Image (spheres, coloured by chain):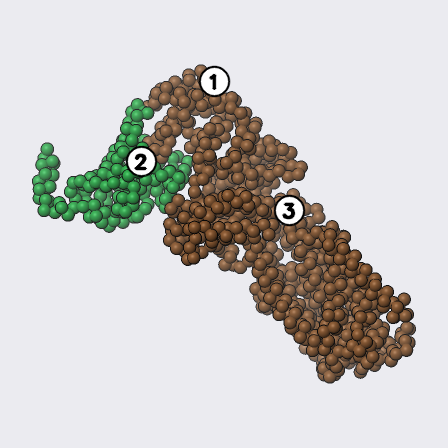
Chain colours: A brown, B green
């Protein structure tokens, strides 16, 4: 087919169009995801699964913390009430809490009416003479205290103080102070609200919608005043802000880089048609990448699109090489095909070797990225080779760059003189990297977050004021059904309560507190005595107390009723604020149930994870897991990072092996590899000197530097070898192929590489000015990296005066 | 009755100034007090119980809103009012009551705090005030304005001399009452 280019050109174009159509069809049916599934390893540990579950559906991920500042306290309070009323009516929100006692009545009724099923104090011992005496004595003493005013009316019905005990349990959480009937910061300058959304924290659109509804309520309720300020924070708010920040920065920066690159290419091509055609390889590559990943994985992750498109950025260079390197004397690109395609092909294969390592990653996200880049690069290269030449207009001519090329050529001949200084620089760079190898990488997942320090501080501050859960430490009990996990939760609670009493924990939450297991409810019911027994015991218990037994007739009646009351179920919690807690802490999954028990650290002290783990282990409970979500997410990320580093090194080894196979000369391979290693080392050393710790995006950038840089090295190598080997090659005797000499080829090659690296520098350089760490990392790695790769290639590749 | 006589004499002697002894003066005097420490004995009459309950202990006050009542007999117990919440410690149990959730209790405690702080505006938002006596022997009677509160407390009578409080008598609407005698040991 290759022997008759014109028909094969048509065939190629037809195949290409058919491929694009097919890909478009696949893409139209592709499911794009942005959830965290890409981060979950193929075979996750139970802790990792739990982490993702919590990030996705956990209570903490669905909280929005709201503060209202400005104007005066009573206006803020009024606004808070009106906003809360509006939001409570909105199905988008599960709960809106601003300190108003909306559920207080229902909550108290639930606790009081069911106190003998709910209170852990209800045991057979409580109803013995001694037990009653001690409980009554306590209550009478309480009556004498200021709180006695509150409990006086309860005494005849609840002389053992079950209600007080239940309230004590509930009140253990810190609650913000109230001004004018609503929550306010302790300095009283802002009203506060805690909102729980129905949509999960990872549903960024849902979170954005919820934020809009809150802002809308803030602006439109009658009490709204222009001097008031609304501040929102929380995990969902963070993801919305992050997305907005990245979106707006990407938009602004890509507009700038597109203008810069377009201007440069227009100066070079002098043709809009060429400019458009030049994008065909990379666009085809992106289309192919998405379609192949979609077929291979059943879905395409947003991360794959973002990083993958950067990784195949190399493909933009292909068309520059084609346009600038091809003979511009008569629309015949066959020379290029013969002279340079093998080299570009080798460059593509090296890049593929580099990215292939990702394919075998245990993380679907990385594997997708590998598949995307490989299929994208192959398609882009094939389009450059077989389609693009036939689409160029006959009289296509790029701007004459031979003058620039000659200057470069002169410079290059002297470049080899820099070899020793360059080696000194490299040794220094290597030394710096070696010295910092311990803290080279930042393996904290927060290093990826585009959320600013100030925003994090605001969140921490507001969270502390609101006493909102900062869910980091959890105990999770799993089981087959609700009863199972409630029993487990009760057993865990018993262990945790000991830790609370020891001061190891400030407290913990458990769904079993609001909804005990049936077993426990039955046990409590069974410990309630019959009327005659209770009357008898009471009469003895009050003998030396300043009360008469007949005061407690209502108590006896309540106990009698509780003995036969139906057991509590989730439905009984309806309309109480405890329903929300149980809902968040008791999770039904497809095939099992989990009960989540968040732990609260003692004030001014952390939680000793090992101690708690040991306490839980020694209790010998099955299906119970202690999770430190922060450590777990850091582990997940650092594992991910470690794997990519190893795979990248593996990729490098594979590239070396490939070149050895092709060149069969270790020295030649060394000359080609050295510039890449040198560029990587120098960039990393530079980043260290500027005080940057590397994140995963630096590594992606370095992969790109190697991919792009290998083309430079190979092309230069090819140029220098051209004079020596081209004549000996079979298949070069096509009619118009005048054997190029080094003098003729070199300037054009050099110019094409200069332009290719300039576009890369313009494209990625602007990212270096981004305030978003993941964009900035790419920018500061790729832009200097490709320039250095080009320089080092010029310095090291040439053999003549070695 | 030499004391009464003395009082009467004193009253006469002060007649010229009596017109000027008013709530504002009392409040100003109280407001100057930054902290105080006193011993108390309290007796509570509760209809439900067959005997009155007696207790004693110490009181600490720091302007403008920290009040601590440390009961020593019959059983150690402490109650601290701070920043709108009441922390009650009995034995190993600590119970925090958020006053905003208990408006009656809040109004009741506020009557004492606001008197000690000389915060007339806060007092008058909940109570009608009636001051009798002299600067050296005054009685401030508080009667709740709101019906909701009237169902709970009938009157609070705070007696004192100068800017020290000597007794607090609380009469509840249900007939229960308490009397707290305060023996001041003023601290500078």
Between discs 1 and 3, the one toward the N terminus: 3
Q: Chain of mark 1?
A: A
Label 1 and label 2: CA atoms lie apart by: 42 Å
x and y percentages locating residue B9 in the rendered image: 8, 40
Q: Which residue is mark 3?
A: A48
Q: Nearer the viewer, mark 1 or mark 3?
A: 1
Q: Residue at x 56, y 45 (%)?
A: A198
- Tag 1–tag 2 contact (CB < 8 Å): no
Q: Chain of mark 2?
A: B
Q: Which residue is mark 1?
A: A530
Q: Badge 2: how crowded within 10 Å, few (<14), some, or many (20+)?
A: few
Q: Chain of mark 3?
A: A
| Res. A164 image quadrant | top left
Q: Which residue is mark 2?
A: B147
Q: Please name whichever residue, A209 or B132, is drawn nearer the observer in this view of the structure.
A: A209
B29 up-or-down from B50: above or below: below
Residue B29 vs residue A122: left or right?
left
Q: Residue at x 69, y 58 (%)?
A: A305
A488 up-or-down from A280: above or below: above
Q: Quadrant of the N terminus of chain A?
A: bottom right
Q: Residue at x 73, y 57 (%)?
A: A290
x and y percentages locating residue A258 in the rendered image: 65, 69
- Can residue A237 be seen here? The reply is yes
Q: Badge 1: how crowded within 10 Å, few (<14), some, or many (20+)?
A: few
* Discs 1, 2: same chain: no
Q: Quadrant of the C terminus of chain A?
A: bottom right
x and y percentages locating residue A708 in the rendered image: 73, 68
Q: Secondary structure at mark 2?
A: helix
Q: Please name whichever residue, A152 or A705, is drawn nearer the observer in this view of the structure.
A: A152
């Amino acid at each position: 087919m290759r022997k008759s280019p014109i028909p094969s050109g048509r065939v190629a174009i037809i195949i290409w169009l058919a491929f694009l159509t097919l890909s478009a069809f696949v893409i139209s049916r592709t499911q794009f995801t942005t959830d965290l599934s890409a981060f979950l390893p193929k075979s996750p540990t139970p802790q990792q699964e739990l982490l993702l579950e919590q990030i996705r559906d956990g209570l903490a991920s669905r909280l929005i913390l709201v503060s209202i500042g400005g104007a005066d306290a009573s206006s803020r309070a009024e606004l808070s009430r009106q906003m809360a009323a509006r939001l409570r009516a909105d199905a988008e929100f599960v709960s809106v809490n601003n300190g108003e006692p909306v559920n207080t009545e229902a909550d108290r009724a639930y606790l009081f009416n069911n106190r003998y099923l709910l209170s852990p104090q209800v045991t057979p011992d409580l109803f013995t003479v001694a037990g009653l005496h001690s409980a009554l004595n306590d209550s009478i003493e309480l009556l004498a205290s200021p709180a006695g005013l509150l409990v006086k009316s309860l005494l005849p019905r609840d002389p053992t103080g079950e209600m007080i005990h239940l309230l004590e349990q509930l009140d253990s959480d810190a609650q913000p102070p109230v001004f004018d009937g609503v929550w306010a910061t302790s300095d009283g300058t802002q009203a506060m609200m805690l909102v729980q959304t129905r949509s999960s924290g990872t549903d960024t659109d849902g979170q954005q919608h919820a934020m809009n509804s809150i802002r809308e309520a803030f602006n439109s309720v009658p009490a709204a005043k222009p001097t008031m300020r609304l501040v929102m924070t929380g995990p969902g708010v963070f993801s919305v802000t992050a997305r907005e920040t990245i979106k707006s920065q990407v938009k602004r920066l890509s507009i700038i880089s597109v203008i810069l690159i377009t201007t440069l290419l227009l100066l070079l091509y002098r043709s809009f048609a060429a400019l458009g055609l030049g994008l065909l390889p990379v666009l085809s590559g992106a289309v192919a990448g998405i379609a192949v990943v979609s077929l291979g994985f059943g879905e395409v992750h947003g991360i794959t699109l973002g990083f993958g498109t950067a990784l195949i950025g190399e493909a933009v260079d292909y068309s520059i090489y084609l346009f600038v390197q091809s003979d511009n004397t008569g629309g015949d690109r066959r020379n290029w095909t013969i002279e340079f395609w093998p080299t570009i092909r080798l460059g593509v294969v090296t890049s593929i070797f580099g990215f292939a390592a990702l394919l075998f990653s245990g993380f679907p996200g990385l594997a997708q990225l590998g598949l995307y880049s490989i299929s994208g690069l192959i398609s882009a290269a094939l389009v450059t080779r077989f389609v693009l030449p036939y689409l160029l207009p006959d009289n296509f001519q790029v701007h004459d760059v031979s003058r620039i090329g000659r200057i470069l050529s002169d410079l290059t001949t002297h470049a080899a003189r820099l070899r020793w200084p360059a080696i000194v620089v490299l040794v220094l760079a290597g030394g710096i990297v070696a010295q910092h190898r311990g803290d080279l990488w930042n393996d904290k997942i927060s290093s990826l977050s585009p959320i600013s320090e100030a925003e994090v501080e605001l969140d921490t501050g507001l969270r502390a004021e609101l006493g909102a859960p900062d869910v980091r430490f959890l105990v999770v009990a799993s089981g087959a059904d609700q009863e199972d996990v409630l029993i487990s939760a009760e057993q865990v609670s018993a262990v945790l309560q000991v830790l609370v009493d020891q001061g190891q924990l400030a407290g913990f939450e458990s769904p079993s507190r609001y909804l005990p297991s049936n077993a426990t409810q039955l046990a409590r019911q069974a410990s309630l005595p019959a009327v005659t027994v209770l009357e008898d015991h009471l009469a003895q218990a009050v003998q030396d107390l300043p009360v008469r037994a007949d005061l407690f007739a209502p108590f006896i009646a309540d106990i009698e009723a509780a003995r036969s009351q139906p057991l509590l179920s989730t439905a009984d919690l309806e309309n109480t604020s405890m329903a929300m807690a149980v809902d968040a802490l008791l999770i039904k999954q497809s095939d099992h149930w989990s009960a989540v028990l968040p732990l609260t650290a003692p004030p001014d002290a952390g939680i000793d994870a090992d101690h708690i783990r040991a306490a839980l282990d020694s209790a010998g409970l099955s299906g119970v897991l202690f999770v430190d979500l922060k450590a777990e997410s850091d582990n997940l990320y650092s594992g991910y990072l470690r794997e990519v580093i190893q795979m990248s090194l593996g990729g490098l080894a594979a590239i070396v092996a490939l070149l050895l196979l092709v060149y069969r000369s270790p020295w030649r391979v060394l000359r080609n590899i050295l510039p890449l290693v040198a560029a990587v080392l120098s960039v990393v050393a530079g980043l260290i000197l500027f005080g940057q710790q590397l994140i995963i995006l630096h590594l992606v950038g370095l992969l790109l530097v190697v991919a792009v840089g290998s083309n430079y090295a190979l092309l230069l190598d090819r140029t220098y070898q051209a004079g020596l080997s081209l004549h000996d090659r079979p298949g070069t005797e096509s009619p118009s192929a005048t054997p190029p000499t080094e003098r003729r080829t070199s300037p054009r090659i050099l110019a094409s590489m200069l332009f290719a690296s300039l576009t890369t520098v313009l494209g990625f350089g602007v990212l270096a000015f981004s305030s978003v760490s993941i964009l900035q990392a790419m920018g500061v790695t790729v832009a200097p990296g490709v320039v250095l790769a080009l320089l080092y290639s010029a310095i090291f590749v040439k053999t003549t005066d070695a | 009755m030499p004391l009464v006589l003395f009082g009467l004499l004193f009253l006469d002697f002060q007649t010229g100034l009596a017109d000027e002894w008013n709530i504002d003066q009392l409040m100003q005097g109280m407001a100057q007090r930054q902290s105080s420490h006193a011993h108390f004995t309290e007796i509570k009459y509760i209809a439900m119980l067959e005997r009155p309950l007696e207790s004693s202990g110490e009181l600490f006050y720091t302007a403008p809103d920290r009040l601590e009542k440390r009961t020593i007999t019959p059983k150690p117990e402490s109650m601290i009012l701070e920043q709108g919440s009441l922390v009650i410690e009995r034995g190993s149990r600590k119970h925090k009551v958020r006053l905003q959730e208990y408006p009656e209790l809040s109004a009741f405690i506020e009557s004492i705090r606001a008197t000690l702080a000389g915060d007339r505006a806060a007092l008058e938002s909940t109570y009608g005030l009636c001051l009798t006596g002299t600067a050296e022997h005054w009685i401030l009677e508080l009667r709740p304005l709101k019906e909701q509160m009237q169902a709970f407390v009938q009157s609070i009578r705070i007696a004192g001399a100068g800017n020290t409080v000597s007794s607090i008598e609380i009469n509840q609407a249900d007939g229960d009452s308490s009397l707290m005698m305060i023996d001041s040991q003023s601290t500078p």
